[in-house]
Amino acid sequence: MSITVAAEEKLYPSFRFAIDRGGTFTDIIAHVTHADGTVTQEVTKLLSVDPQHYADAPSEGIRRILRKHLPEKVAATGPVDVSHLEEVRMGTTIATNALLEHNGERCAMVLTEGFEDILTIRDQARPHLFALNIVKAQALPEQVMAAKERIRPVSDKEQAAYASQAEWPSTWVRCGESFVMDVLQPLHTDDIRQKLQAAYDAGIRSVAVCLLHSYAYAVHEQQVKHISQEVGFPAISLSSELMALIKYVPRSITASVDAYLSPLILNYIASFKANFAHNLAGVRLYFIQSDGGLTSADTFYGYRAVLSGPAGGVVGYAHTCAEDLGATVQAVGFDMGGTSTDVSRCEGPVVYHTVEAEIAGTPVQAPQVQVHTVAAGGGSLLRWENGMFHVGPTSAGAHPGPACYGKGGPLTVTDANLVLGHLHPDYFPKVFGPNADQPLDKKASVKLFKALAAEIARDCSEGTDPFMSVEELAFAFVLVANEAMCRPIRNITEASGHRCAEHALAVFGGAGGQHACAMARSLGMNKIYVHRLASILSAVGASVTDVVEERMASVRLDLRAEGLAPVVVQQFDELIGSAAAQLRRLGFDDNHIVIERFLSMQYEGTNTSLIIAEGDDQAVAASAVFSAEKFERLYLAQYQQQYGFVLSGARRIIIDGVRIRTRGTLQSRSEREAQAASAATATQKQLQQPPYTTRTEKVPPQPVSMTRSYFASGWEEIPVYHVDPANGPLRGPALLIMNGTSVLLEHESTAYTNDKGNVIIHTAQIVEQFTTELSPLPLSIFSHRFMSIAEQMGNALQRTSISTNIKERLDFSCAIFDPDGNLVANAPHIPVHLGAMGAAVRWQRDHYGSEWKEGDVMLTNHPACGGSHLPDITVISAFFHEGKIVSYVASRGHHADVGGTTPGSMPPFSKTLMEEGAAIKTLKLVQQGTFNEDGIREALLAPGKLPGMSGCRTIEDSVSDLRAQVAANNRGIQLLQGLIESYTLEVVQAYMKHIQTTAELAARRVLQRIAREYGEAAESGTADTGLVTLQATDYMDDGTPICLRISIQPESGEATFDFTGSGSQVLNSTNCPTAVVHSSIIYCIRCLVDSDIPLNQGCMKPITVVVPPNSILSPDEDLPVVAGNVTTSQRVTDVVLMALRAVANSHGCMNNFTLGSSDFAYYETICGGSGAGPTFAGTSAVHTNMTNTRLTDPEIFEARYPILLRTFRIRRDSGGAGLHRGGDGVVRSVLALRDMIAVVLTERRVLAPQGLLGGGSGERGLNMLYVPVTPSHTATLGAPVWKNAHDMLHDKMRGPWMEEEQTTLYHPRNIGGKNVVDVKMGDIITLYTAGGGGCYAAAA
């Protein structure tokens, strides 16, 4: 290696340690180099926390291995001698656990004034779609301080306007080659010093700083850092030093994560070193970062440590799979732990990274391995609910643990595997029971399974299995757990444009081997890879990974611009110079340093970037060459692979980031080249195929024992083998015992052991066969399968779409339907789409009948045909099997524009439907396989033929997105075809019905419960009719009532939702299609079920909906409806939930806000406060009920549009009072940098959101326009005339961007809830969204 020790100083044996310090166990691998040059390996495993025996597991493990070899030098206690110790590498879950358990360092946060609540608001989406009690991830800082400063990006147009002048404005600062920033307000240093001093005096010692646009202009952050140092803060995290990438929300959260975790990590490193002589002086100490690379202890920062543990496992399987199966192998990593399962994907040794991901509910910006987590592990709880088996998401934890741990724990997946004989208790240590000295307790597991079987027998309705044996029940839960873990694997492969079946399943972690064969079959994979050290593969990864230094920089460069090459080369050189210098400081010479270069690239006008690797690794000394043509070719190829298409050549490709990854390697360049040549030899390739060995003879395997295991066919006696490289192939069924883990080798599976002792399993496809009879096991399996199909349709649509609305705001939904057009399953997308889509499918089915031919795809957006509003276009495909339609799939997406009177197709004052754009009852978008582009263009452009109207203003994007919707539907049909091939058409269709029956049962139980709870308090008696009647009425802001009377039959759970008394249809756009009313009801029922069941038509089976004709909820088909979808739907939801006593009113609308002119259009929905419930408070600043779309990041917003975002904060105390307070709304204020049109389409501006059960009402919303006037007040309104945005922003008399609206410098105008406003440069529009209602009267 590059780091050497003088021969006379090196002592043998010498030791290099690789450690994975997990939450439960610490795994240690020691590589021992002897005086004769041989290297041996030792492995040990300790409990991570065992205070009775040692203070720190990693240092104790090192001590024990050193003492084994050097008993005279290494004492049993005291500091560990390090004279023979060369290197320690460690991965740790300390950071992850601190995030999960909220026990990081007390810290403060400095944010730009006006954005103090950004850590709470984030992107405004709620994490769980059907949760009425909305729980968002908590902000980590204890205190937030506002820095009085402001920077804004200067647009290319503004720069061009000054091109002919001698000099730029003095406040403009060029930041590199890509950005020009305008310093609107220098940092108020005295103010921030006072705030920092107060935080320090309160005992806080760690501070994070993130100021707007500091990715380019970091001067103010550096000033805050300097002041913080003077105040005395020892830990300071600057966002510009951590990850200088555009996007304020993730960058600010990342800085807070670093401030929260870094002191904790530094303390641990110090305590670890203290366990060794001389504090480990002279020993190389590295830690694994989230990207899988090592870094020195001095540069191991909190924000890059959150995936330290899992990253080692990803590197481990990528490296070992490539060695044993070839450098081009595609593999999926399957790391099944106690509480959850991590899945990932690699190609050969290449580990895929992302620079932004959510970890423990917290988005972190940092290079990190792409890992997806599902809450199903060995300790996941087994539950029976609503006629279905459920696994997770809650876990038994380490204490009490599973029932078989003998500590009174619940039933878990581990218990199921033990009962089934899929794991062997004799090969587990006796560390269980109250005194930690007993074996696994199978009797405890069996006892609980018997009790659960009896419960299921009592609960099952007629026609289901009357009773299940213990083993049948355990087997059913294992299969359901397998399906739960298969779903994220399907998603990560399909989402990147790869076929799941083309991958090998790389199994590691302690529990994965028991599920590997069954999961591989479910996924269509035929190869499984299990490393001999699979149970400690994260430590293996630590031993083989490189020391890595990464650098990134934000840029904005046109890939095809002249003179680009030297600019990019300079960027690369600066980053490489910094990173290589750090590796040299660690002792690596240039011969052991490898450079990888990447560009982050995106099509102009999108926010979706791809990280493009240049290709071959380079030496430090290699002359830098940049080829735009090569990067364009690589970008288009990756775009095609991931999204299935490329855009036309006219669309510019933008470089938005430069990234380098330098690696300090164990091998020199010549050694790496020799290894690559060896891997390409015929002998090596032979080792990558069955029988995976060069040995001509293998010893017939001999079992060490026999054991009983349960399979689909029943109990069987199967052999137990110790894995041995000398053995020939092992054929299932059998139980394979490996170092620290076991593998269940199922029927029709063959295990090969290669010369290293690693196992490669080949599986044949066996599908569990079900009948059409309703049974809990297949019901649970099909629930996952149907949901997975809808999810993969959504993945395909998001991948192949181009518009911001679909690709980034995720304003779309995908679903599958039975032959009658009833909703079977949908991915958790946009609630307002869900119930309405079934109506759209049924209308098209009835309209075409037998004329619907195979290969036809129908399009509709008309509210009379199941549509919601015109921008929501639904694409419907029929699935034909043997010439007959057997089901349907559909996708609905919000298109940016479909024509009409205003950009965005959401006019607030429309009087007719045609004013809102193209209204299409039906159109054959695809006719027998041919895309009807001419027809759809004609239909979308048709409104432009009418006076005062425009056709679709985004026709190219719309056509592209419609192709994407067709592709998503095709994917759904392919997956349904596969399901039928596996289980037969009859079984699939039967379970499409059964899954609806299950949802119906759940809905009936909810309604029965409500009838029991509120029967006595209902508005009318039940004596005469036997019905429980609940009522609620609310009003639209124009006074139109929404009346609801719910009558529930307590015995059957049947109900009538009668909207009689609701107001008549109106001559404005708040009319609501009846299909949307159904969406609101189905959403409410699903929320109240409060269990993981598919949302489908069954939820509506017990419900009769009565909607009076010609009412606001059933308008004539020529009346406008665009606001009904986004405002009235929310009111209907509030009324339903209020009548059912579930939750107080939310903020009551989607707060639609559109800004635009001839050359740009921007649309957003804005969050507010959620209503409180009987057992919980409302949540502030969150989307509720019928929407869950995301907001554009503030920095992206200002970089892309001629608008300044003045503030985005929580509107304090706007939630309703009560025992449980309502959530607060928000204040969102924008300043126009040039003339434009603004459209607001909102509710709850006149009538306040009501409280529940005596709770107070939330504050009403308010939409204000502030028009600047001259200071003398003598001029007319709007008199200030500025030449440009710069002059306006730097008007010393006014400073309009930062002054409060209520000054005499503005004339305020209440623009009402719905309006179209001509906005002039310098005007301010501020939206104050409503708070949610409270619940119960506040205590006196």
Image: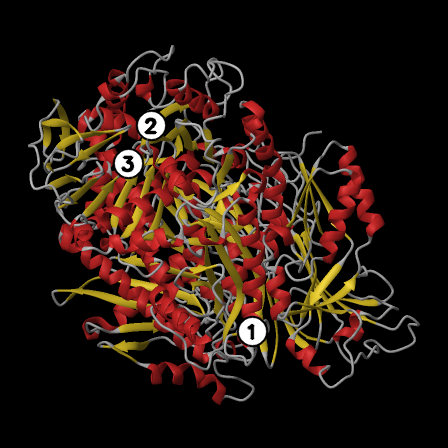
Asked if residue 675 is positioned above or below residue 278 in the image, the reply reads below
Q: Is residue 186 left or right of residue 72?
A: right
Nearest the viewer among 921 and 74 is 74
| Res 112 quadrant in image | bottom right
- The residue to which callout 2 is attached is 42
Residue at 41% across / 69% down in the picture? 635
Q: Position of residue 1114 (x, y in %)?
A: 45, 65
Q: Quadrant of the C terminus?
A: top right
What label does residue 566 carry, if any? 1
Element type where label 3 sits in the image: helix
Q: Earlier in the sequence, mark 3 or mark 2?
A: 2
Nearest the viewer among 1282 and 586 is 586
Nearest the viewer among 267 and 180 is 267
Asked if residue 947 is positioned above or below residue 193 in the image, the reply reads below
Q: Amino acid at mark 1?
A: Pro
Query: Which residue appears farthest toward the front when viewing the image?
Result: 8
Q: Earlier in the sequence, mark 1 or mark 3?
A: 3
Asked if residue 930 is positioned above or below residue 107 in the image, the reply reads below
Q: Position of residue 32 (x, y in %)?
A: 36, 30
- The residue to which callout 3 is attached is 512
For the residues labelled 1 and 3, the Cα–Cα distance comes to: 50 Å
